[in-house]
Image (cartoon, grey):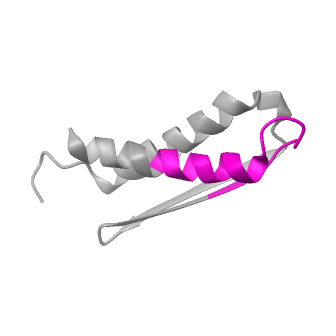
Amino acid sequence: MSSEEPTDEEIVQTASDAAEGLIFSRYKQSEVRDYDVTVVFEDGVLEVDVYLNAPEDGADPEQVADDAALAAREAVDELFGE
């Protein structure tokens, strides 16, 4: 591993920040009842799990959770692409 590659901690933080950013771009923070973003990066494998409890009268919470996980993966891809 070269010193140019991001650390595991940077990868996890980048993914988590991207997922949270997407959630709060779709919902006001006061509308979100509960959420959890779990990011694990081990042996070169990224796992992202997003739980979201938010009202269904706007965006679909399941779709937002899926989109947040995708945003997390894309952010990590960009981190490696730089």
Q: Which residue occupies the foreground of this view, 59 or 2?
A: 59
Q: Is residue 63 above or below residue 31?
A: below
Residue 5 on image: x %, y %:
18, 49
Q: How many marks?
A: 0
**Residue located 78% across and 38% down the image:** 59
**Residue located 68% across and 53% down the image:** 36
Q: Which residues are magenta?
A: 50-72
Toward the bottom, the furthest residue is: 43
| Residue 20 picture quarter | top right
Left or right of 70 on screen, residue 64: right
Left or right of 78 on screen, residue 57: right
Left or right of 38 on screen, residue 11: left
Quadrant where the C terminus sits is top left
Q: Is residue 22 above or below residue 2?
A: above
Residue 24 on image: x %, y %:
67, 32
Quadrant where the N terminus sits is bottom left
Q: Which residue occupies the foreground of this view, 71 or 38?
A: 71
Residue 45 on image: x %, y %:
36, 68
Q: Is residue 63 above or below residue 45?
A: above
**Residue located 50% across and 44% down the image:** 71
Toward the left, the furthest residue is: 2
Q: Which residue occupies the foreground of this view, 66 or 53?
A: 66
Q: Is residue 82 magenta?
A: no
Residue 65 on image: x %, y %:
66, 51
| Residue 51 picture quarter | bottom right
**Residue located 66% across and 38% down the image:** 23
